[in-house]
Amino acid sequence: MNTDALLKSFIYLVSSSLLYPALILLTLLILWIIIYSGSFFAEWLERIRRHGSLPGELPMLIRESNEKNIFTHKVNSYLETLRSLLNAGSRPEEVEIENILQETTLSFWKSLDRIRMIVRIGPSLGLIGTLIPMGTGLAALGQGDMTRLSSDLVIAFTTTVVGLAVGITAYFFYTIKRRWVEEDIKNIELVTEILAGDIPKDKQQ
């Protein structure tokens, strides 16, 4: 067997072996999207149930109110952490507050990484699941095996549809979640500026 035929056989073997992993991963992505939909709509319900307030009222509410429905639970968690730090015996330095703010902001952005990857991975797996059966289907067509061709075409088209559906759904979730993350980051920056700015200068030293 010459080198050309050996390389073709190797590439064909590798390509064919990727079909079932692609199908398994697409199945797992579908299950993950279904589970993620539950948490997404739970957060959506939390946000629409919040008490609305005018922008000018927020500073006073942050300083004086213990109302938990002003912000989401993520922002409330950060608010409690910041208040406990500011009310500690030794007042924190500005760099400590900034570090907590940056760490929280980073964790908010990291929460989008998985759904952002699925936006790309879903259609890519669908394309893999399309091209591999198309190759074997064309080979079956050359041999006159129409049954094998029909089976391969069904797999090819269904994986395309599933991959695109996963990608579209993930992109929808990502777009909305990104807007929510930006809103939460704006709120924690506002909370930090208000509460940390209320510390007398002599107590920060």
Image (cartoon, grey):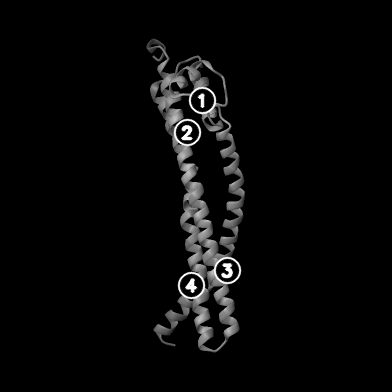
The residue labelled by disc 1 is 79
Distance, label 1 to label 3, CA atoms, is 47 Å
Residue at horizontal 40 percent and vertical 18 percent from the top? 197
> Label 4: few (<14), some or many (≥20) within 10 Å?
many
Task: Give the residue type at disc 4.
Answer: Leu
Residue holding disc 2: 184
Q: Is residue 7 above or below residue 164?
A: below
Is 70 situated left or right of 106 in this image? right
**Closer to the camera in the image, 41 or 22:** 41
| CA distance separating discs 1 and 4 | 51 Å
Query: Measured from the top left, where is residue 192 in percent x and y?
Result: 44, 24
Q: Which mark is residue 20?
A: 3
What amino acid is found at the position of numbered circle 3 in the picture?
Answer: Tyr
Q: Secondary structure at mark 4?
A: helix
Whether residue 107 is visible: no
The local secondary structure at tag 2 comes to helix
Sequence-earlier tag: 2 or 4: 4
Question: First in sequence: mark 3 or mark 2?
Answer: 3
- Marks 1/3 in contact by CB < 8 Å: the verdict is no
Q: CA distance from mark 2 to mark 4?
A: 42 Å
Kindly tell me whether residue 127 is visible in this rendering: yes
Residue 122, compared with residue 49, is above or below; it is below
- The residue to which callout 4 is attached is 131
Q: CA distance from mark 3 to mark 4?
A: 13 Å
Asked if marks 3 and 4 touch (Cβ < 8 Å), the reply is no
